Image (spheres, rainbow, N blue to C red):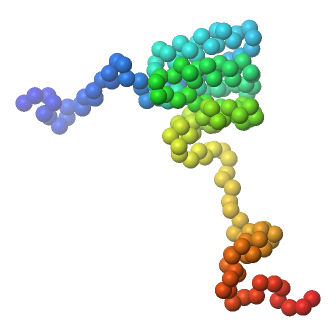
Amino acid sequence: MSPTDTPAAPRRTPAPSPGAPAALLVVPFDTLVDLDNEVAAEAALREAVERHPARIVVVRVRSRVVTPQALRILLRAGIRTAPGGVLCVAAEYPAARRVFHLTGLVRVLHVAATVPGAVRRVRGGPVRHPLRPQPRLPLRPYPALARTWRRDGGPRGAGSARPHGPAGPR
């Protein structure tokens, strides 16, 4: 009996092929990028992305401030991902995420608050911020919206037994 026939034998997982990209790569981006360290920061990020090719590359921005130099570096790094790969950003501070929204880069880079949120955004799933409560829908719409809704065929629309207007003369 061979060791692989016994039930206690550990299962062997096949080694990934050397040319295939990994599924996920998380790269920390901790520095505040300015003109003095732009070249060094870009080289470090480029080296990490090219050394470990992956289908999803998440750049974890840990700085509260995102400079134009950092935005330029992230855009250039998106080009260097593996073929068919996607670069996304996990920025934990709201001020940093706001910069991506104001510049319109949320259309190019998938931006979320956490790494799992960024991965869900790439895959097309819903992204829920863990610390922000989800808004509740009102049980009864606002009065102005309710009138418009009824006029457009809401519950008191055509065929309803209830009158459309006020109950009686004022």
Counting from the top left corner in percent of width and height, residue 168 is at: 86, 91
- The quadrant of the picture occupied by the N terminus is top left
Q: Nearer the viewer, residue 43 or 13?
A: 43
Is residue 146 among what the camera can see?
Answer: no
Counting from the top left corner in percent of width and height, residue 61 is at: 64, 26
Residue sitting at x 37%, y 23%: 20
**Above or below — where is 142 with respect to 20?**
below
Counting from the top left corner in percent of width and height, residue 66 is at: 73, 25
- The quadrant of the picture occupied by the C terminus is bottom right
34 displayed left or right of 41: right
Q: Nearer the viewer, residue 40 or 6?
A: 40
**Above or below — where is 109 with respect to 153?**
above
* Number of numbered discs: 0
166 displayed left or right of 112: right
Residue sitting at x 57%, y 36%: 118
* Figure quadrant of residue 90: top right
Is residue 2 among what the camera can see?
Answer: yes
Residue sitting at x 68%, y 86%: 160
Residue most extreme to the left: 1
**Above or below — where is 165 with respect to 153?**
below
Counting from the top left corner in percent of width and height, residue 40 is at: 64, 9
Residue most extreme to the right: 170
23 displayed left or right of 39: left
Residue sitting at x 56%, y 28%: 87
* Figure quadrant of residue 117: top right
